[in-house]
Image (cartoon, helix red, strand yellow):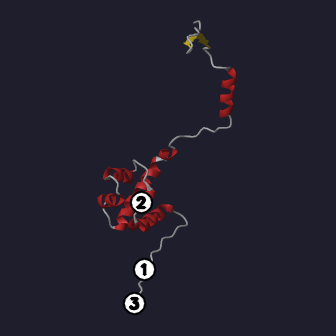
């Protein structure tokens, strides 16, 4: 297949031809810019292993339980759609820990729930102190 030059009409009415290939210097310059770049995966955080998603969903459910909240009540406090919170609990979606930590009544229960799955070397101790005023 033969290459056909493109014709352009200049403002003065003069017809000029445009080359139909990219200059090799420009190609080399563009390729040089790509050297040294490392490819990265997009949305790598969504690719956590499904068993971890299930465990994190259990952590979220345990957090709600420790706080004495139903899933519906927790979703209202979180200002999230109940279906989205259900996906967190079911392990279908990665929980938004920043949203969970933004609700004060969920902070301590979340830390406890995470500590419960931490395993070896983590001990959970609950201490209640009451100060009486005179």
Q: Earlier in the sequence, mark 1 or mark 2?
A: 2
What crowding class fits label 3: few (fewer than 14 Cα within 10 Å), some (14-19), or many (20 or more)?
few
Q: Which residue is mark 3?
A: 133
Q: Nearer the viewer, residue 81 or 90?
A: 81
From the top left corner, tell me how far across and down residue 17 is, in percent. Answer: 60, 11
Quadrant assignment, res 4: top right
Q: Residue shown at 47%/61% (left/top)?
A: 117
Q: Nearer the viewer, residue 120 or 108?
A: 108
C-beta proximity under 8 Å, tags 1 and 3: no
**Residue found at the very far front of the displayed protein:** 12
Quadrant assignment, res 14: top right
SS at circle 2: helix
What crowding class fits label 1: few (fewer than 14 Cα within 10 Å), some (14-19), or many (20 or more)?
few
SS at circle 1: loop
Query: On screen, 35 above or below 68?
Result: above
Left or right of 30 in this view: 59: left
Q: Which residue is mark 2?
A: 100
Q: Residue shown at 65%/38% (left/top)?
A: 37
Q: Which mark is residue 109?
A: none
Q: Nearer the viewer, residue 6 or 43?
A: 6
Q: Nearer the viewer, mark 1 or mark 3?
A: 3
SS at circle 3: loop
Query: On screen, 28 above or below 117?
Result: above
Q: Which residue is mark 1?
A: 128
Q: Earlier in the sequence, mark 3 or mark 2?
A: 2
In which quadrant will I find the N terminus? top right
Q: Earlier in the sequence, mark 1 or mark 3?
A: 1
Q: Residue shown at 45%/58% (left/top)?
A: 98
Spatial separation of the CA atoms under disc 3 and disc 2: 34 Å
């Amino acid at each position: 297949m033969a290459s056909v030059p493109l014709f352009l009409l200049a403002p003065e009415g003069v017809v000029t031809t445009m080359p139909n290939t990219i200059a090799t210097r420009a190609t080399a310059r563009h390729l040089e810019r790509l050297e040294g770049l490392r490819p990265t995966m997009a949305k790598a955080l969504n690719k956590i292993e499904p068993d971890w998603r299930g465990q994190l969903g259990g952590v979220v459910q345990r957090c709600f339980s420790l706080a004495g909240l139903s899933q519906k009540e927790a979703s209202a406090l979180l200002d999230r759609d109940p279906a989205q919170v259900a996906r967190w609990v079911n392990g279908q979606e990665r929980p938004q820990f920043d949203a969970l930590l933004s609700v004060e009544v969920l902070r301590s229960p979340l830390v406890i729930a995470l500590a419960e799955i931490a395993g070896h070397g983590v001990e959970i101790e609950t201490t209640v102190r009451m100060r009486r005023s005179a």
